[in-house]
Amino acid sequence: MNWPLFSVIYLIAATVTTGIFIIVALVTGLNEIAHVQIAVVLGTLAAIPGAMFFTKKVGSITGNEEHYKV
């Protein structure tokens, strides 16, 4: 897996999904700090599979999926 690409995509995906989860929590009335913290954790964890999926897709398009082996 292209880890530098994964890092960039994960940072973007985590920011977006965390923001969406926080907005959903606030709109539904779950506006206590514990609920917001749960939304942050869930948004951060939910971004991992999405980032892996898009990293593999972009890597297969560019042909650079195997260049960064650790």
Image (cartoon, grey):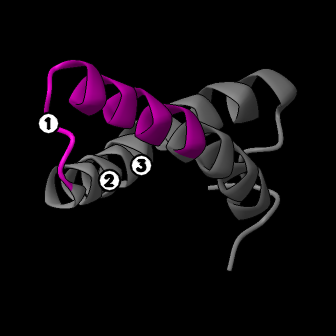
Residue 24 counted in the magenta span: yes
Start-end of magenta stretch: 15-32
Find out whether the residues at labels 1 and 3 contact each other: C-beta distance under 8 Å: no
Residue 20 lies in quadrant: top left
For numbered disc 1, what is the local secondary structure? loop
Identify the residue at image location x=71%, y=71%.
69
Q: Nearer the viewer, residue 29 or 51?
A: 29
Q: Say which amino acid is labelled 3.
A: Ile
Q: Residues within 10 Å of mark 3 (few under 14, many from 20)?
A: some
Q: Say which amino acid is labelled 1.
A: Leu
Residue topped by disc 3: 48
Q: In the picture, which quadrant includes the N terminus?
A: bottom right
Identify the residue at image location x=78%, y=65%.
68
Residue 60 lies in quadrant: top right
Residue topped by disc 2: 45
Find out whether the residues at labels 2 and 3 contact each other: C-beta distance under 8 Å: yes
Which badge, 1 or 3, is on the more N-terminal residue? 1
Distance (Cα) linking label 2 and label 3: 6 Å
- Vertical side of 44 occupied by 13: above or below: above
Distance (Cα) linking label 1 and label 2: 19 Å
